[in-house]
């Protein structure tokens, strides 16, 4: 049971994290709370255009305060640096709008807190995290580790993105809510007051529920049998109609009133709940819990806090909306006409500048680790191009986009690629800019194709296999998939004793662990040749109609097939589809070769990843040389020791 409870807690934590991250309260603050407060309080001593504080010169180029420190480096790839400025640019291209929106929101909340002398201390944040962790019976350290593992949110980001805004908005909203003694008492009664245990029968048909009510009233002892066999609520029917104990003030007022007025074994009247007609039978009344008097103050304080927290969730959103509606926000980023007027500024919030360097730091803190991996791979490809004295031209880019449009079926009526419609689709479906599409997809594809040029050949054998796989006959089969060999042997014996398709389908429905074959009584999509499962294909195509296969092991599962014959070929003329086959096979083989080539570049690379040091690596050849040197040193030391002895 300990394992089950642990799993339930872990699932609950995951859900809570997900809710927190997407909540309106989870506004971004990717710099530390203290740093954000300092920036907001101290910014803007020098006047800029129209009275807006001028932003300081971008500090994305510096890691220290030393003016001679040079560019800040986030990684080196075989000695070639990737600067913080380069990484910030790539992060902005993809996530700039969202990150800036979060910074604007954070600034608005911070300004409102300062205006009302509301402060959120580090202790407040730590206490809230500890309180949240305790809900899931986890230590703070375990809870923060789970957040980092499940959502890739660092403890600093969690404190800034989720907890700080929540506490700040709670402080701004607190004067607008109150909790009355009557509300506390209702909550107390729901938690510690009397409960009633009942059985339920639920049916949609009024005539049916009326008949069941007559039967139950005539014989109350039959209620649980009627609930099990006739109720249309499967959850309660599976336990003879039993519901969890009903508490006061926690759900449907009518249901509670009816349930609490019943005496043991008494049957209720028929009433409606949603689209169901309901009958209840009282099982027993459960007396109040009556906790010790010494605990009452603590219980009431907890209930009051929970009620305040519940109300604050609704109030905080309206508070934030009023803040935003009453503020003057000017977004400068990505607007050239404003960028020249407010140099080094990303946005202006109520006459307070958000500098570009803070914006860049926020982008890198939130997305830098993820984006840096792609930039490291790109740098490897760039270096390989230089070494091979090749380059990617604009013509190469244009041709690859045309090829992609053609490959995915975006064609004009005259047969030419519809590039414009293809690009529109990519930008809409993937929610990316054209520049990001070219940077992330087109350029690497073109570059890798150049680097593997001449290494990919489409042979006649490839074409023949492709023709058989795509256009040749396919094997129609019924299939049973089993998870262990013992069960497979038993099922195979059953199938051998009754060779009918109907019985084989029943076996599949009863025993198969693969959902499609189980629900479809063994029927699966027809198998084709050269699809990557040679043992299964050979067995299927070797069978005669009506024959049952032996037990076939596939990926640690056990499969039994029953042949229903072969389909007719889709196309019989090889030459009619040879051109399309060639293009398709070439595309697939190029992709495999490109993946293999990039993997080899990574394997041989010396990478220093300063954002995620654990992902740094030395090349395979360097590792091998170091191991060999260590062996030689060990042998030499051993020889010296022998000589001394």
Image: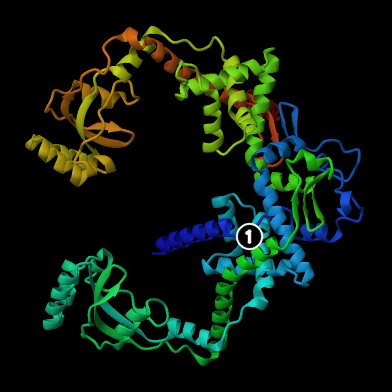
Location of residue 392 in the rendering, given as x and y in whole percent from the top left corner: 66, 17
Number of numbered discs overlaid on the protein picture: 1
Q: Residue at x 22, y 67 (%)?
A: 204
Q: Which residue is mark 1?
A: 162
Q: For label 1, count other residues whose C-alpha is less than 10 Å away and answer few (under 14), some (14-19) or many (20+).
A: many
Helix, strand or loop status at disc 1 = helix
Where is residue 411 drawn, in percent x and y? 46, 21
Residue 391's place in the image compared with 370, above or below, is above
Residue depicted at 38% across the width and 7% down the height? 460
- Name the side, left or right, on which 352 lies relative to 195: right
Q: Quadrant where the C terminus lies?
A: top right
Q: Give coordinates of residue 63: x percent, y percent.
A: 82, 43
Residue 602 vertical placement versus 50 (above, below): above
Name the residue nearer the viewer: 378 or 427.
427
Q: Inspect this view and state whether residue 579 appears.
A: yes
Asked if residue 296 lies left or right of residue 525, the reply is: right
Task: Quadrant for the N terminus, please.
Answer: bottom left
The residue at 55%/69% (across/down) is: 134
Who's the residue at 69% across and 67% down the image? Answer: 168
Q: Is residue 31 left or right of residue 239?
A: right
Q: Is residue 409 above or below residue 129?
A: above
């Amino acid at each position: 049971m300990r394992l089950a409870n642990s799993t339930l807690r872990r699932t609950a934590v995951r859900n809570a994290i997900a809710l927190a991250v997407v909540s309106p309260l989870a506004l971004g603050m990717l710099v530390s709370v203290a740093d954000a407060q300092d920036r907001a309080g101290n910014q803007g001593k020098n006047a800029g255009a129209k009275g807006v504080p001028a932003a300081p010169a971008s500090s994305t180029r510096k890691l220290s305060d030393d003016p001679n420190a040079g560019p800040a480096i986030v990684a080196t790839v075989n000695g070639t640096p990737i600067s913080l400025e380069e990484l910030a640019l790539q992060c902005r291209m993809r996530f700039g709008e969202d990150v800036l929106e979060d910074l604007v929101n954070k600034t608005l909340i911070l300004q409102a807190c300062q205006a009302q002398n509301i402060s959120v201390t580090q202790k407040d944040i730590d206490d809230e995290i500890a309180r949240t962790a305790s809900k899931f019976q986890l230590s703070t350290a375990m809870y923060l580790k789970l957040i980092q593992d499940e959502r890739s949110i660092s403890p600093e980001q969690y404190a800034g993105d989720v907890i700080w805004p929540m506490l700040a908005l709670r402080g701004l909203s607190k004067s607008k809510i109150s909790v009355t003694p009557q509300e506390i008492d209702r909550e107390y009664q729901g938690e510690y007051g009397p409960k009633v245990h009942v059985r339920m029968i639920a049916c949609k048909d009024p005539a049916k529920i009326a008949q069941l009510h007559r039967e139950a009233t005539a014989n109350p002892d039959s209620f649980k049998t009627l609930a099990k066999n006739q109720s249309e609520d499967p959850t309660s029917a599976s336990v003879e109609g039993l519901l969890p104990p009903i508490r006061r003030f926690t759900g449907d007022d009518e249901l509670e009133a009816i349930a609490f007025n019943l005496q043991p074994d008494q049957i209720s009247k028929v009433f409606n709940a949603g689209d169901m007609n309901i009958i209840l039978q009282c099982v027993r009344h459960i007396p109040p819990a009556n906790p010790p008097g010494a605990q009452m103050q603590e219980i009431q304080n907890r209930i009051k806090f929970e009620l305040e927290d519940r109300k604050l969730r609704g109030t905080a959103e309206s508070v934030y909306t009023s803040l935003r509606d009453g503020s003057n926000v000017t977004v400068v980023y990505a607007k050239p006409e404003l960028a020249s007027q407010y140099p080094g500024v990303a946005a202006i919030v109520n006459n307070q500048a958000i500098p570009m360097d803070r914006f860049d730091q926020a982008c890198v803190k939130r997305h830098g680790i993820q984006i840096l991996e792609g930039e490291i791979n790109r740098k490897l490809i760039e270096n390989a191009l230089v070494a091979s004295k090749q380059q990617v031209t604009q013509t190469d880019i244009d041709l690859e986009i045309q090829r992609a449009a053609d490959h995915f079926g975006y064609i004009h009526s005259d047969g030419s690629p519809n590039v414009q419609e293809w690009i529109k689709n990519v930008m809409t479906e993937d929610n990316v800019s054209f520049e990001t599409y070219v940077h992330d997809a087109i350029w690497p594809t073109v570059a890798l194709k150049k680097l593997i040029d001449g290494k990919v050949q489409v042979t006649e054998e490839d074409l023949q296999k492709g023709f058989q796989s795509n256009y040749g006959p396919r094997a129609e089969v019924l299939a049973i998939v089993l998870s262990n060999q013992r069960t497979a042997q038993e099922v195979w014996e059953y199938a051998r004793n009754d060779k009918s398709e109907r019985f084989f389908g029943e076996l599949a429905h009863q025993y198969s662990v693969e959902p499609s074959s189980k629900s479809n009584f063994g029927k699966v999509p027809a198998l084709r040749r050269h699809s990557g499962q040679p043992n299964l294909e050979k067995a299927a195509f070797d069978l005669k109609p009506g024959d049952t296969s032996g037990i076939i092991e596939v990926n640690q599962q056990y499969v039994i097939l029953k042949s229903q014959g072969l389909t007719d070929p889709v196309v019989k003329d090889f030459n009619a589809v040879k051109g399309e086959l060639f293009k398709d096979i070439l595309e697939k083989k190029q992709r495999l070769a490109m993946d293999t080539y990039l993997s080899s570049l990574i394997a041989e690379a010396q990478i220093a990843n300063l954002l995620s040091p654990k992902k740094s690596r030395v090349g395979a050849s360097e590792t091998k040389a170091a191991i060999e040197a260590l062996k030689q040193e060990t042998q030499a030391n051993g020889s010296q020791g022998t000589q001394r002895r």
